[in-house]
Image (spheres, rainbow, N blue to C red):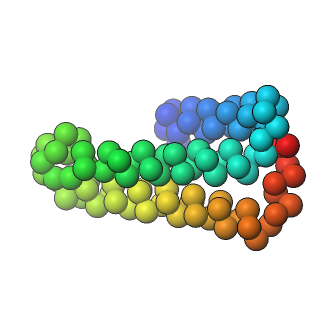
Amino acid sequence: MKKNTIKSIAFVAVITVAASLVADIPYIYTLCGISVWVAVGHLITLDDDMPGEWSNPDENKKHWHQSLLILFCKFAVALLIGILIFVFPVLVKFGA
């Protein structure tokens, strides 16, 4: 794993636990909010990954396709967490 991945996971864990302890927000709601935030943030900056744009000046289509795949995965995770909230409402009790 990359160092940034480990730091990101640690950051999400700290935010999730802190939101639970300070504001009595269930873990699943915090995870849902963070996952939606990450997916929407990627969507907003998606144009930077297009061939010839800021993050892809070499017009590499592989970079563009990878970015689209990662965006799809981020939205899939957000959707999965949202579905889990409705299918397993008992998850709302954890961390609150």
Looking at the picture, does residue 38 appear above or below residue 19? below
Residue 70, horizontal then vertical, whole percent: 41, 56
Left/right of residue 57 with respect to residue 47 in the rendered view: left
User: Looking at the image, which residue sits at the far front?
Assistant: 23
Q: Quadrant of the C terminus?
A: top right
Q: How many marks?
A: 0
State the image coordinates of residue 37 (x, y, percent, origin top left). Answer: 52, 45
> Which corner quadrant of the image does residue 13 belong to?
top right
Residue at the bottom extreme of this rendering: 87
Residue shown at 28% from the left, 61% from the top:
65
* Picture residue at 33% right of the left edge, 54% below the top: 67
Asked if 57 appears above or below 64 in the picture, the reply is: above
Q: Which residue lies at the image location 53% right of the left edge and 39% below the top edge?
A: 5
Camera-side residue of 37 and 12: 37
Q: Say above or below: 57 vs 90.
A: above
Residue drawn where x is 66% and y is 48% of the image? 31
Tell me where residue 44 appears, x and y as whole percent: 35, 47
24 left or right, relative to 64:
right
The foreground one among 12 and 86 is 86
